[in-house]
Amino acid sequence: MEQWKTRLQVILSEVRAIPAGDTSSRQMRNNAYWGDFKEIDPGKIVGWIFSEEEHGKRMKA
C-alpha cells in the first residue's frame, strides 16, 4: 500500500509542477488528463507505471 501511496504522490507532484498557463502537448498528463483527481482510473495509473517506472516511453528520434 505504501508503494501505491508513493506513486500517487509522485503523480500529484508532477501535475502540480506544470505551470498554470502551459497548454503545450508536452504536458500530456495534466490535471484534466487525470480527471481533476475525482476518481482513480486504473488504466491511466498502469500506463504511468509502464512509462515512468518501467521506462516504456516511446519517443520520436
Image: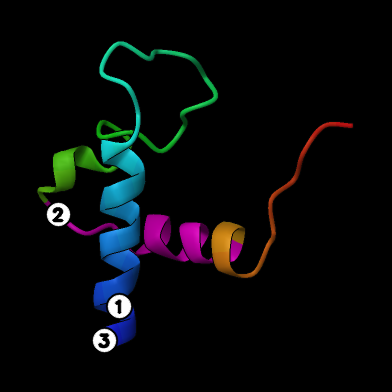
Earlier in the chain: of badge 1 and badge 2, it is 1
Amino acid under disc 3: Glu
Q: Residue 39: which disc? A: 2
Q: Which residue in the protein does label 3 denote?
A: 2
Residue at 64% across, 69% down: 54
Q: Which residue in the protein does label 1 denote?
A: 4
- Figure check: 46 above or below 22: below
Task: Tell me where residue 32 sits by quadrant.
Answer: top left
Q: Position of residue 19 (x, y in %)?
A: 32, 22
Q: Position of residue 31 (x, y in %)?
A: 25, 34
Q: Position of residue 43 (x, y in %)?
A: 40, 60
Amino acid under disc 2: Glu
- Figure check: 33 above or below 8: above
Q: State yes or no: discs 3 and 1 in contact (Cβ < 8 Å).
A: yes
Left/right placement of residue 11 relative to residue 57 reads left
Question: Which residue ends up furthest to the bottom in the rendered image?
Answer: 1
User: Gap between marks 1 and 2, in whole Å?
Assistant: 15 Å
Earlier in the chain: of badge 3 and badge 2, it is 3
> Is residue 22 in the magenta section?
no
Q: Position of residue 60 (x, y in %)?
A: 82, 32
Left/right placement of residue 28 relative to residue 13 reads right
User: Gap between marks 3 and 1, in whole Å?
Assistant: 5 Å
Q: Which residues are magenta?
A: 39-50
Left/right placement of residue 57 relative to residue 47 reads right
Task: Tell me where residue 22 sits by quadrant.
Answer: top left
Q: Residues within 10 Å of mark 2 (few under 14, many from 20)?
A: few
